[in-house]
Amino acid sequence: AVRIFAAGIPCTGASKAGFSKNRLSCAEEHPDVGYLFLPTIHYIRLHKPEIVVLENTDAYRNTLSAHLLRDALTASGYTFDERIVNPLKEFSTPSQRKRWILVASRVGRFSWVYEAKAFVGTLADYLDPESPEDDAESATADQVDADKKYCARKASEGCGFAMTLIDRSSTKCPTIPKSYGKRQPTGCFVRTKKSYRMLRPREIARIHGFKRELFAGLPKTTQYELYGQGVVASPFICLGESIARFLDGEKAAAPAGQLELFAG
């Protein structure tokens, strides 16, 4: 029996958007999620699962929370492998959604080895073909004008965010946040003959690497939030397979009965 503890600590305080929006001086200052690394450390120290998988936005790597998590893991007898993963450059996926991933082990030293493959295609296989649906969902002239004014105001405030337009010939897609359903003008939109439209949930599912519409049947706003809070699938499928091979190897190399010490 091997216990694997996976923790996706909310990144709201560490992400670029959350940090700016909430005017924080550090990620831990976020009133809703800044403290959640503490129960994570408590659980690990108390239960000592054999494998710990932590993931977060890439900026989380340099937070105080991440430093304390590393210290707690070391004090509890773990070795760990951590990195920043870029699906666009390493997992042949059109999404630029980078993630910080740390894998800690108490049953041997885990090392995540994989062959990096950059995405070299276009979004033609991920975006829906042109259809009458585009006209119905395209921004009106008034919306386009309002979006331009909003983006100009944000730029003057030093926001650092701007509208991104993509189409079937584009070679990458920016990060889709959990607030995408609110249609923020500084988000990502798909060009249409009329103007531009929002990405559809099924298109985000394809871009994030899901083989099917994971949240089909739920309200569209809920789908947007769930996909936006999710991660690109391909790196984690690869990681899961690597952990399985690692555990199989450790089990084969261990003397008979040794793994009983770590049974949950």
Image: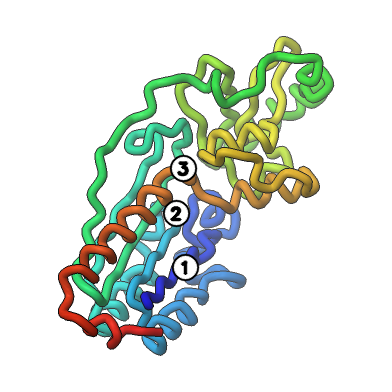
Residue located beneath label 2 in the image: 57
The image shows residue 176 at horizontal and vertical percentages of 58, 41
Q: Give the mark toward the camera: 2 or 1.
A: 1
Work out whether residue 141 can be spotted.
no
Look at label 2 and name its amino acid. Answer: Thr
Q: Amino acid at mark 1?
A: Ala
**10 Å crowding of disc 3: few (<14), some (14-19), many (20+):** many
The structure residue drawn at horizontal position 49% and vertical position 66%, both measured from the top left corner, is 9
Q: CB under 8 Å between callouts 2 and 1?
A: no
Q: Secondary structure at mark 3?
A: loop
Mark number displayed over residue 97: 3
Residue 263 x/y as whole percent: 36, 84
Nearer the N terminus, badge 2 or badge 1?
1
18 left or right of 260?
Answer: right
Q: Is residue 104 visible?
A: yes
Q: Nearer the viewer, residue 229 or 246?
A: 246
Q: Amino acid at mark 3?
A: Arg
- Tell me which label, 3 or 1, sits earlier in the chain: 1
Badge 1 is on which residue? Answer: 7
Cα distance between the residues tagged 3 and 1: 18 Å
Secondary structure, mark 2, is strand
Residue 82 image position (x, y, % from top left): 28, 59
Q: Secondary structure at mark 1?
A: strand
Q: What colouring method underlies this structural image?
A: rainbow
Q: Quadrant of the C terminus?
A: bottom left
